[in-house]
Amino acid sequence: MSAGAAVPVVRRVSELRAAADTVRSQGGKAGLVPTMGYLHEGHQSLVTRSAAENDLTVVSVFVNPLQFAQGEDYGAYPRDLDRDRQMCAEAGAGLVFAPPAEEMYPQAPITTVTVQGLNAVLEGRSRPSHFDGVATVVAKLFAIFGPGRAYFGEKDYQQLAIVRRLAADLSLPMEVVGCPTLREPDGLAMSSRNIYLTADERPAATVLWRSLQAGREAVEAGSRRPGEVEAAMAEVLAAEPKASPGYAAVADAATLDRPEVLAGELRLLVAARLGRARLIDNIGVGCDRL
Ligand code: PAF
């Protein structure tokens, strides 16, 4: 990371609104990159894209308590705002919004966003309140800043699908932009939670990528039954002694429904725990009817 001027930080909702009003009053476009901080190159790629498409890019850095259940890593989630500001500067952000929790939730909210359907599968099975918390904070960020575009990584594919539906269902005048996952040279998807991996666990964490490759190979070899493809992925996850498998699933890329026969645009999705790190990953696979 090269040294350079860090991006200015605002902590108050009123300050972020004022920045948005200024850019819009000058006919400019405002882009938002919502994050929980501890940024990596994957986040930077979202910022770079937003900076290329908008006049002001704001990166929100907020570890949202609403999306963590009891016993999850809310307290331990890595935080380093100075480093985040540098990374935002390198990628072309204009402003960081880093509110304290009391600013986002001055009182315990009695009005929240509830997600149905898309919430009931994959991550939602083991984290039933997670996406309601994500949808609530994202809706608040959209309401505060009013971005014309907001940028989310495909690494959290279910989250991206839910945020797209949120924007459509609530008739928000904005575009939700999905951006490709960035990977380490050995295939591990970049994630703030990779910091939890020990030196022993780090090589084993490629099991998610290896599992996805096995799924892709099964589809490319002609498998059209979801169960067969899922079994190929699950076998790879189960063979890694350092990993506790979560799920290995095939879904329709748009609806996240499990297809009866594989056809069209699909998503292969996996989750596994390695020590303290619960990791998820996914890839897209196109599939012709045989
Ligand atoms: O993906 C994340 O980092 C978070 O879920 C988000 C979208 C910033 C909401 O807190």
Image (cartoon, rainbow, N blue to C red):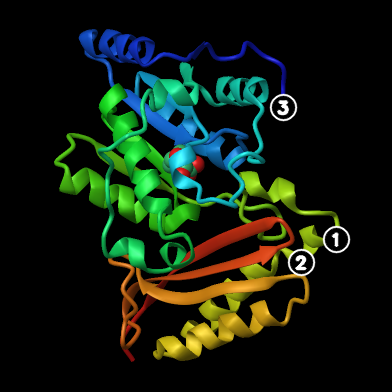
Check contact, mark 1 vs mark 2: CB within 8 A: yes
Mark whose residue sits in front, 2 or 3: 2
Say which of 112 and 55 sits in front. Answer: 112
| Amino acid type, mark 3 | Met
Residue 21 spot, x, y in % from top left: 26, 11
Q: What SS does tag 3 mark? A: loop
Q: Which residue is mark 3?
A: 1
Nearest to N terminus: mark 1 or mark 3:
3
Q: Which residue is mark 1?
A: 200
Taking the spot 35% from the left edge, 84% from the top edge, the residue there is 262
| Amino acid type, mark 1 | Asp
How crowded pointer 3 is (Cα within 10 Å; few <14, some 14-19, many 20+) is rated as: few
Q: Is residue 222 visible?
A: no
In the rendered view, does 281 fall on the left or right side of 113?
right
Q: What SS does tag 1 mark? A: loop
Q: Which residue is mark 2?
A: 204
Quadrant housing the C terminus: bottom left
Image quadrant of residue 38?
Answer: top right
Taking the spot 47% from the left edge, 15% from the top edge, the residue there is 11
Residue 169 spot, x, y in % from top left: 17, 48
Nearest to N terminus: mark 2 or mark 3:
3
CB at disc 3 and ligand 1 closer than 8 Å = no
Q: CA distance from mark 1 to mark 2?
A: 7 Å
> On screen, 223 above or below 138?
below
In the rendered view, does 195 fall on the left or right side of 176?
right
Check contact, mark 2 vs mark 3: CB within 8 A: no
